[in-house]
Image (cartoon, rainbow, N blue to C red):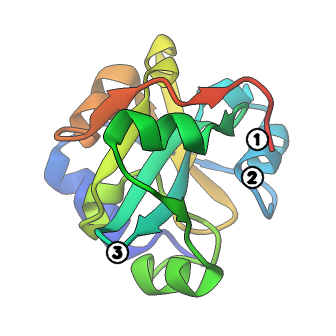
Amino acid sequence: MTIPETVVNYLDHANVNYQIHRHAHTASSLQSAYSAHVPAEQIAKGVLLWDEIGYVLAVIPASNTLELETLNYLIDRKLELATEEELGDVFDDCALGAVPAIGWAYRVPTIVDEELLENPRLYFEAGDHEELILVEEADFETLMEGAEYGRFSNGEPE
């Protein structure tokens, strides 16, 4: 599978510099880190959540576990993990489970764990299971424009 058009269009429209980093087929962001020989804390992992208000994309380091209760407290919501079917509906041009960390490209409000900003370079799923997008931290912040920020993950990956 190639990088979804939605992802490419969003990157190009944002006018950021990016590189494509290929790796062996994997089933998770943490596996992608190992396969691509990239530190897991440099991979921005998107986690789709929902409640009666709508969807939210939480973006955390792949090396961490989402602290859902903390996130819900921070934004005063009662979010839950989205189902696999919902993932397919929202990220309809992506391989199932290959969630790009750019929620705004899919019109999904985004909240970013501030720990990611401690990295000079960041990677995120390209929308397939064989490629990562590499951007500098400043370009990542450009892609996250309009996102909320907070601390809502811990250093123990799922």
Residue at 17%, 43% (x, y): give it: 15
Q: Is residue 99 above or below residue 17?
A: below
How far apart, in angstroms, are the residues tagged by discs 1 and 2?
5 Å
Mark 1 secondary-structure assignment: helix
Tell which of 143 and 115 is nearer to you. Answer: 115
Residue 23: numbered disc? 2
Mark 3 secondary-structure assignment: helix
Residue 22: x, y in percent?
66, 52
The amino acid pointed to by label 3 is Glu
Q: Is residue 71 above or below residue 128?
A: above
Image-based side of 114 in relation to 75, left or right: right
Tell which of 138 and 68 is nearer to you. Answer: 68
Q: Earlier in the sequence, mark 3 or mark 2?
A: 3
Q: Is residue 117 above or below residue 47?
A: above
Mark 2 secondary-structure assignment: loop
Residue 115: numbered disc? none
Q: How crowded is the residue under tag 1: few (<14 C-alpha within 10 Å), some, or many (20+)?
A: some
Q: How crowded is the residue under tag 3: few (<14 C-alpha within 10 Å), some, or many (20+)?
A: few
The residue where tag 1 is placed is: 36
For the residues bearing labels 1 and 2, Cβ distance under 8 angstroms? yes
Tell me the quadrant of the picture where the N terminus can be found.
bottom right
The residue where tag 3 is placed is: 5
The amino acid pointed to by label 1 is Ala
